[in-house]
Every structure is written in structure tokens, then in C-alpha cells.
Amino acid sequence: MKPLTLTVDAPSHQYPIFIESSLQDALMRQLAQYSSKKAAIVTNHTIAPLYLEQVQAACKAAGVDAFSIILPDGEEYKTWESLNLIFDGLLTNHAERSTTLIALGGGVIGDMVGFAAATYQRGAPFIQIPTTLLSQVDSSVGGKTAINHPLGKNMIGAFYQPQAVFIGLDTLKTLPEREFAAGMAEVIKYALLGDAEFLNTLEQNISAIQAQEQDILAQVIFHCCKMKANIVAQDEKEHGVRAYLNLGHTFGHAIETEMGYGVWLHGEAVAAGMVLACHLSEHLGHINAEDTARVIRLLEQAQLPTQAPDFDLDTWIAHMQHDKKVINGEMRFVVLERLGKAAMAKGITAEILANVIPHV
Ligand SMILES: NC(=O)c1ccc[n+]([C@@H]2O[C@H](COP(=O)([O-])OP(=O)(O)OC[C@H]3O[C@@H](n4cnc5c(N)ncnc54)[C@H](O)[C@@H]3O)[C@@H](O)[C@H]2O)c1
Ligand SMILES: O=C(O)C(=O)C[C@@H](O)[C@H](O)[C@H](O)COP(=O)(O)O
Ligand SMILES: [Zn+2]
């Protein structure tokens, strides 16, 4: 594949996304332009042995003096404690406000490092090097940064855009299959919320994507980043259309929080959540049972769960009342007007939810 570039034209900051088959090549070509002379590479114990050396070498070649901060791995570590480990590392190594934080890893690392960058000395620059499919198609783009709270996902955070995003397709070769599948949930989300033609492309090419055939994989990652960049350019801080990127997430975040962070992967919970969003959309008369069946078929082909756990209804609702789309105490849900077009639904009562959600 030939290197691809696109620009995120967010109102607060414009920045490039570089997509190449080799991460090393992308960094060697462009890092010097986007990093300050001093950098902190923040990663975790799983990713460090795989990719840290490569990023250190690229920093050296770019004349960037880099030190590393290595965190424990897992959604359950997306916490204040890990954030403090980042701050400890920054202070111990005399990081300045101009020091670039380099997030090397999946969405957990990216979200935490972005939040650390937003708050360290009131705002240091940061770069995203996403190494999971999920982070390449979604979390590294658009500037949502956060940590979890025991009562809710991503409850403490900031909107803060990176300086650049470097995507190397080669990093996905070491990604476990279950994690690749989790990334496919967000890929399928883009098709459902805004592009029926992309849904056809995914259905026709699912095996090639799973086999990581470079051309189609690059096309898919590029397409998702472009869709997200368009949405973020219109609505950086989620006052309107950006909420559509939350399709399946009101239910999904409830699953992640209730099960305990890390038990269901984010993408798995979003997959089951999107099926519930389909059922809700059906209940509202927007889509039909065949549409929902089509979504379930694709999610199953992508090796994703389509059946949510059956908590009691009060538990579901208690979690969903913490959702960030709640306004004046009223829950709002992203639904599908049709496959390929999202809409926002209000006035969803407990009775409606009882018809839609599996519960005991
Ligand atoms: N900010 C956003 O817009 C946004 C969007 C979507 C998701 N998220 C957040 O992203 C997180 C999920 O991200 P994720 O799915 O990337 O999970 P993750 O960051 O936990 O990474 C998944 C696992 O894969 C490992 N890993 C990462 N890259 C690897 C590689 N190349 N080879 C081998 N192992 C590798 C990680 O160490 C981890 O164990 C959630 O916290 C979610 O809330 C944020
Ligand atoms: O970028 C966005 O906007 C999204 O909603 C992308 C989601 O995939 C992502 O999981 C996000 O972190 C969820 O946002 P939240 O505001 O509900 O925490
Ligand atoms: Zn998500």
C-alpha cells in the first residue's frame, strides 16, 4: 500500500494522521516535524517489548531526547493511580511544558496519556501511536481523553487534540485475535451510523479484513478516520452530531462497568450494545427485524458477541443514567433511522427499555 495521509480539522487544532504499512517508516519520515526536542514515551508492559525500541530509535534519528514510562496493562488500570504514575515519571525526568508525550499503545494508553498531556503543567503536546485496530480507527482520533471511575466509563477527562497520529499497519500483526475483533466493532459502528455503502464493503470483505490484507485494511482504517475527522470538524465537543459516535455505547458502557472493567472488552460491549440499539430502533419503528438480523450476522462474522448479559433492569438504568448524553436527568440514546443513518432518541421510558434489554 502507498502511504496515506489525512487531516483532522478540529476547531481547536488541526493535525495529520499518517497511515503506512510500516510504523518505523512513518515515524522516520515525519516524527521530527511533530515532536519537541524532549519526549516521554508512555506505554505498557505488553507493548514495550514489542515496539518501544522501534519508537526510541525513531526518536533518536529525529534528534528527540526520549525517556520511557511503562504502565501496567489493562482497562482496569485506566485510573487515577496510573495517571499519577505518568505524572511521577514526567516530574522525575524533569519534563517541561513543551515536552511531547508519546502515547504508544491501544485506546487505554491513548486516553490516559492524552488526559495526562491535557493537564500536565496545564497542557503539554502529545502524539498518538495507536497499536490496536480499535485505537487506529477510533480512539487516537478526535481528542476524547479520559480515565474511568468505578461508577462509570471515561467519567473524568478532557477534550484535547494530539499533534499527530502515526498508524503502522504492521503493529496489528502481533495483536491477539480477540482484540482485532473488538476493533471491528467500532469499524462496523461507522457503517451503521453513517455509511450504508461502507456496510456493503465490510460484508463483502470481512474475511480479507480479518486476514489483514493490506490494501483493504488500509482502506478501512482510512475510511473510519476520515468519517471521524469529518464529524469532529463539525462538532469537536459533542454538542450535536458527534454523539452519533456513541452508537451502542450507552448500553456498552453499562456492560463494561457492571461486569468490572476489562471483563468484557470495550469493543465487545459496544457490539452487544449496538444490537440493543437496533432493537430499540426497531421498537421505535425505524428499522425492521431483517435489518437487525443483518447487523447481528456481520457482528458474528467479526467474532463479536451479540447478546448482552441480563442484569436486572434497575441496574441497567442506574448505569445508563451516568451516561454523558443525559441532559437534565433525561437519558438519550443513539438509534438508527435506517442502516447507515443515526438519530438521537429521547423520551425512552423504563417500559420501552424493558421491552428491548435482556433483564432478570
Ligand atoms: N478516546 C476515544 O475516542 C475512544 C474511542 C474508542 C475507545 N476508547 C477507549 O479505548 C479503550 C479500548 O482500547 P483498545 O481496544 O485499544 O484496548 P487496549 O488499549 O486495552 O489494548 C488492548 C490490548 O492489546 C494490547 N496491545 C496493544 N497493541 C498491541 C499490539 N500491537 N500487539 C499486541 N498487543 C497489543 C494491549 O496491551 C492490551 O492488552 C477503552 O478504554 C475505550 O473506552 C476511546
Ligand atoms: O469519539 C467519540 O466521540 C466517541 O464517542 C468514540 C467512542 O468510540 C469512544 O468509546 C468514546 O470514548 C466514548 O465516549 P464517552 O464520551 O461516552 O466516554
Ligand atoms: Zn468506543
Image (spheres, rainbow, N blue to C red):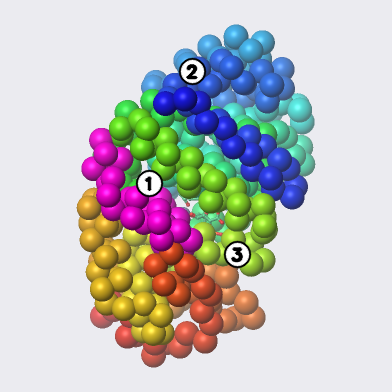
Q: Quadrant of the C terminus?
A: bottom left
Distance from the alpha carbon under mark 3 to that under mark 2: 35 Å
- Label placed on residue 241: 3
Judged left or right of residue 258, residue 61 is right
Q: Earlier in the sequence, mark 3 or mark 1?
A: 1
The span shown in magenta is 186-211
Dot 2 alpha-carbon crowd within 10 angstroms: few under 14, some 14 to 19, many 20 or more:
many
Measuring 25% from the left and 69% from the top, which residue is drawn there? 293
Report the front residue among 170 and 120: 170
Measuring 72% from the left and 35% from the top, which residue is drawn there? 124
**Residue annotated with mark 1:** 183
Q: Quadrant of residue 278?
A: bottom left
Q: Earlier in the sequence, mark 1 or mark 2?
A: 2
Q: Are marks 1 and 2 in contact (CB under 8 Å)?
A: no
Q: Is mark 2 within 8 Å of ligand 1?
A: no
Report the front residue among 273 and 262: 273
Distance from the alpha carbon under mark 3 to that under mark 1: 22 Å
Secondary structure found at label 3: helix
Report the front residue among 107 and 240: 240
**Residue annotated with mark 2:** 24
Q: Residue furthest bottom?
A: 351
Q: Quadrant of residue 6?
A: top right
What is the number of callouts on the image? 3
Report the front residue among 143 and 1: 1
Secondary structure found at label 1: helix
Relative vertical location of residue 305 with respect to residue 77 in this rendering, above or below = below
Residue 337 lies, in percent from the top left, at 45, 75
